[in-house]
Image: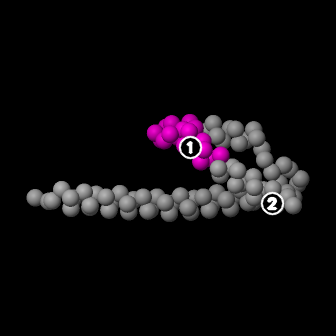
Amino acid sequence: MTDPIIRASEVLKDHRESIDRLDAILVFTLAERFKHTQSVGKLKAEHGLPPSDPNREARQIERLETLSKEANLDPEFAKKFLNFIIGEVIRHHEKLQK
């Protein structure tokens, strides 16, 4: 019979390994996303387009809220997360316009 503390440690280790893999996926996914948003920012700067697109941003937030509900993730957390990312993207776009 396995000691419950040893078993709990094994389960904890498995969860942490999964979390570490998912963190890596998040980082690489965000890096890929920012590669695309940098290209968008350069295109906007080249053509004199504004760094922010409030209509698109609102649609993206709405879309993410729907996805988060489907994924059983707190929609408010998802909204805050996307707003943070959008803020960073806009900041990068503004830099490219200078």
Q: Which residue is mark 2?
A: 95
Q: Nearer the viewer, residue 22 or 40?
A: 22
For this orientation, the residue located farthest to the left is 1
Q: Is residue 9 visible?
A: yes
Amino acid carrying mark 2 in the image? Lys
Q: Which mark is residue 10?
A: none
**Residue 35 percent location from the top left of the image:** 68, 62
Q: Which residues are magenta?
A: 65-83
- The secondary structure type at the circle numbered 2 is helix
Q: Which corner quadrant holds the N terminus?
A: bottom left
Tell me where residue 32 sits by quadrant.
bottom right
Q: Is residue 26 left or right of residue 14?
A: right
Q: Looking at the picture, does residue 48 appear above or below residue 24?
A: above
Q: Which residue is mark 1?
A: 78
For this orientation, the residue located farthest to the right is 48
**Residue 88 percent location from the top left of the image:** 70, 55
Amino acid carrying mark 1 in the image? Ala
How far apart are labels 2 and 1 at the CA level? Answer: 26 Å
Q: Is residue 67 visible?
A: no
Residue 62 lies within the magenta run: no
Mark 2: few, some, or many residues within 10 Å (few <14, many ≥20)? Answer: few
Considering the whole magenta stretch, tell me its main secondary structure: helix
Q: Looking at the picture, does residue 39 appear above or below residue 60?
A: below
Residue 70 lies within the magenta run: yes
- The secondary structure type at the circle numbered 1 is helix
Residue plotted at (75% across, 58% down): 92
Residue plotted at (15% across, 59% down): 3
Residue plotted at (68% across, 38% down): 59
